[in-house]
Amino acid sequence: MRFIDEAKIHVKAGDGGNGCVSFHREKYVPKGGPDGGNGGKGGDIIIKASSQLYTLLDYRYKRYYKAENGENGRGKNQNGKNGRNIILHVPCGTIIREAGRRRPIADLVNDGDEVTVAKGGKGGRGNREFATPTNQAPRFAEEGKKGEEKDIILELKLIADVGLVGLPNSGKSTLISVVSSARPKIADYPFTTLVPNLGIVFYAEGKSFVIADIPGLIKGAHKGKGLGISFLRHIERTKILVFLIESISQSPEEDFEVLIKELRLYNPRILKKRKIVAITKIDLLDEEHRRDLERLRFPNIRRKPILISSVSGEGIKKLLEAIWELLKVEKK
């Protein structure tokens, strides 16, 4: 299941420092030679792929990046320091383009791949560089060059990290609308979701992931009933499965077994993925019913079920924490 996660940023490399006009001054040496140092080089803007990132969401919030300028040269033959580079980290698989151009600058596929997208300006030469036998005391120096400046398009073709698995009306669309910026169609009847919806979940700074709300599963889905085959084809590509079970169901255990059976009949390898069970709509329950659900245990699920309400927000933070912990394990 792929979709385009895209961000547009503006990058400005550092300007080169100016060269210095200076002459050596020392007691008893009234007319020393030129000793103006060169300016430092401006910092570059570098984009580097990281396997620890999942989305480009951070670049939706901050869009302007400027590297440090090089320092100006000084007297006594002192060159200015080079400006520090800025390294921007993106997920593996990010394509880098300059705005307005179709041909990519780079496709950062592997962890550690990097490309310089804006080069820092060269530092200007000090007056010592211009001394010649015929002009031994030049009174001019060179200005530093401007650093490159441009708009950059970051484009990532994402595969969903987390797949929401549940029967129709189990609360998948409502959950994804709460935890991400996705706005799927929501209504109280089966198959409101006719196509996969993907949302980017911002868990914390530098921590985000892609979650997929997929059409509800029914008995016989592995044979193509309902929207089964299209659903199952997508769920194969996710890293983690979150099973959503309605708290108001007559038998949460049977609902879970229906989901497991359909996945097993379609492709047993899907069940090797890491799994979480979330029991939804707990805002509709009294305390006694909630305690009963907390005691439930589902086969081959190590974690206790997480009780959540997308309406009140209860349990949502706990669910996202559990998802993030599993994603970290997947990346190791």
Image (cartoon, rainbow, N blue to C red):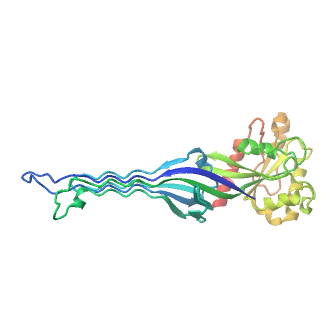
Residue 318 location, x and y as percent?
A: 70, 44
Q: Dividing the picture into quarters, in which one does residue 288 lie?
A: top right
Q: In front here: 54 or 14?
A: 14
Residue drawn at (23%, 56%) of the image: 127
Q: Looking at this rendering, what residue extends furthest in the front direction?
A: 134
Residue drawn at (80%, 47%) of the image: 172
Q: In front here: 230 or 268?
A: 230
Q: Is residue 301 left or right of residue 168?
A: left
Q: Looking at this rendering, what residue extends furthest in the top direction?
A: 286
Q: In front here: 69 or 129?
A: 129
Q: Is residue 332 visible?
A: no
Residue 202 location, x and y as percent?
A: 65, 46
Q: Is residue 97 left or right of residue 215?
A: left
Is the C terminus in the top left, top right, bottom left or bottom right quadrant? bottom right
Residue 242 location, x and y as percent?
A: 77, 52
Q: In front here: 31 or 200?
A: 31
Numbered-mark total: 0
Residue 319 vs 261, above or below: the answer is: above
Is the N terminus in the top left, top right, bottom left or bottom right quadrant? bottom right
Q: Dividing the picture into quarters, in which one does residue 222 lie?
A: bottom right
Q: Is residue 298 visible?
A: yes
Q: Dividing the picture into quarters, in which one does residue 133 lie?
A: bottom left
Q: Is residue 32 left or right of residue 55?
A: left
Residue 147 location, x and y as percent?
A: 43, 54
